[in-house]
Image (spheres, grey):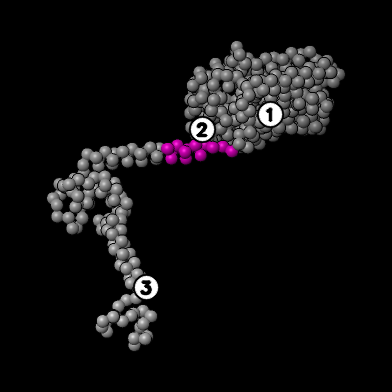
Amino acid sequence: MDNVLFPLWGEFPTSNFLYPSPAVYLASSIAVHGIMVGLAMAATFCYPNGAFGLNKLNDHFLYRDNSTRFCPVPSLSGNIRRPWFCKCPKTCHQPSIMQLAVKQQRQQWKTFFQSTSDTIIEEEKDDTPRATIIWRAIKLPIYSVALIPLAVASAAAYLQTGLFSSGRFVVLLASSALIITWLNLSNDVYDFDTGADKNKKESVVNILGSRTGTLVAAVLSLILGFMGLSWASLEAGNVRSILLLASAITCGYIYQCPPFRLSYQGLGEPLCFAAFGPFATTAFYLLQSRTCELPITGTVLSASILVGLTTSLILFCSHFHQVKDDMAVGKMSPLVRLGTRAGSDVVKIAVVVLYSSLLVLGLFGGLPITCIILCGLTVPIGRLVIRYVAENHQDNTKIFMAKYYCVRLHTVFGAAFAAGLVAARMVAGSGILKRILP
């Protein structure tokens, strides 16, 4: 028995009593001290009254005094609890002035961090990818306002003469695109000067960080574009066309450039109608002549009116998401004057006027029946524009796309109109149109 236990227990020197060996004695001492320390920590950090122990320890050092040193005090959570073993009066557990101050300060910090978090979340929602911003700055769909007047005018000239100059068409298209580039860049420059584009992420000036560079690019685009238009006019030998195109460019200049800036007076839409409608469309029609000067007919005038309406609608809808910024700098756009709700009604009226004018002009012989039929197929897109603006005119994020819905209407309507003019020429010899409209 003794030999078996000897590795762990030795014999007491003066008796048969067993004594612990040094190794066991050390292990037992460590275990006893560990238990005592664990109990102390449990008493400190796991107070039976609830809440986390660090808060309790903090409360103890923050609020202790001689009258309550043996009674737990309220925690930083603000809940006043009376432990089961406390026999003190309830008054010793009432919150002190310091406790109320700490609770109020904690509430203020909570409100601050909550508001900061909401702000960050809102900024993340408005954070548009840079690729999207650059795409919006390029405004490629907007260049349809250069294509559609030229396409409709060329189709009207084809209806009149049966001829089409593809080379001149390409030159006029490239020159018109350069003029539109000038309009877009210079508009960003001068709106940057007035502060209207302060919050406009897709402004070219804000993207490049250079007003001078943007202005230089705008002026170069204007010079090159006007040179192309002048060359086409000289080749066609038509003086009236270059005068009409110069008038269209002048409308663009007084629309946005100092000292005029008539867009700030709400006159942008009438100027846009004149520039892209009667001036540009009629000029492009005249430039498709090869041998003699074409007569200005009711068909080309009717076409220029419809093109001017759809182009002006694009400009009108581009103001919806800029009402606050325009108002801040004193830019009295139609939407600033009317408000977005009334503006949505104007869009509805404009679309109705567009298709009503198409029908009236067609019935009175100003337009071929083929134009009425093909343009009538675009009515669903017109209804889509009306519905989208009516539903989202108060949402700046969604209403931004309204002008692109108008671009879609402008492009499809113009293409259908041009196709109708070409179709009218192709079937003119068969006598079908005469039988339909005697």
Left or right: 25 in relation to 156: left
Disc 1 and disc 3 in contact, CB within 8 angstroms: no
Q: Is residue 117 magenta?
A: yes
The residue nearer to you, when weighing 212 against 315, is 212
Q: Give the mark toward the camera: 2 or 3.
A: 3
Residue 434 seen in this snapshot? no
Q: Residues within 10 Å of mark 1 (few under 14, many from 20)?
A: some
Q: Mark 1 points at which residue?
A: 143
Image position, residue 382 (x, y; %): 60, 33
The residue nearer to you, when weighing 366 against 163, is 163
Q: Residues within 10 Å of mark 2 (few under 14, many from 20)?
A: some
Point out the image quarter for the N terminus: bottom left
Looking at the picture, which amino acid does disc 2 mark? Answer: Asn
Q: Give the mark toward the camera: 1 or 3.
A: 3
| Residues drawn in magenta | 116-129
Q: Mark 2 points at which residue?
A: 396
What's the residue at 67%, 25% (across, down)? Answer: 307
Q: Which of marks 2 and 3 is nearer the N terminus?
A: 3
What's the residue at 32%, 51% (across, down)? Answer: 54
What's the residue at 33%, 37% (across, down)? Answer: 108
Looking at the picture, which amino acid does disc 1 mark? Answer: Tyr
Residue 419 seen in this snapshot? yes
Point out the image quarter for the C terminus: top right
Left or right: 372 in relation to 290: left
Looking at the picture, which amino acid does disc 3 mark? Answer: Ala
**C-alpha span from label 1 to label 2:** 23 Å
Q: Which mark is residue 23?
A: 3
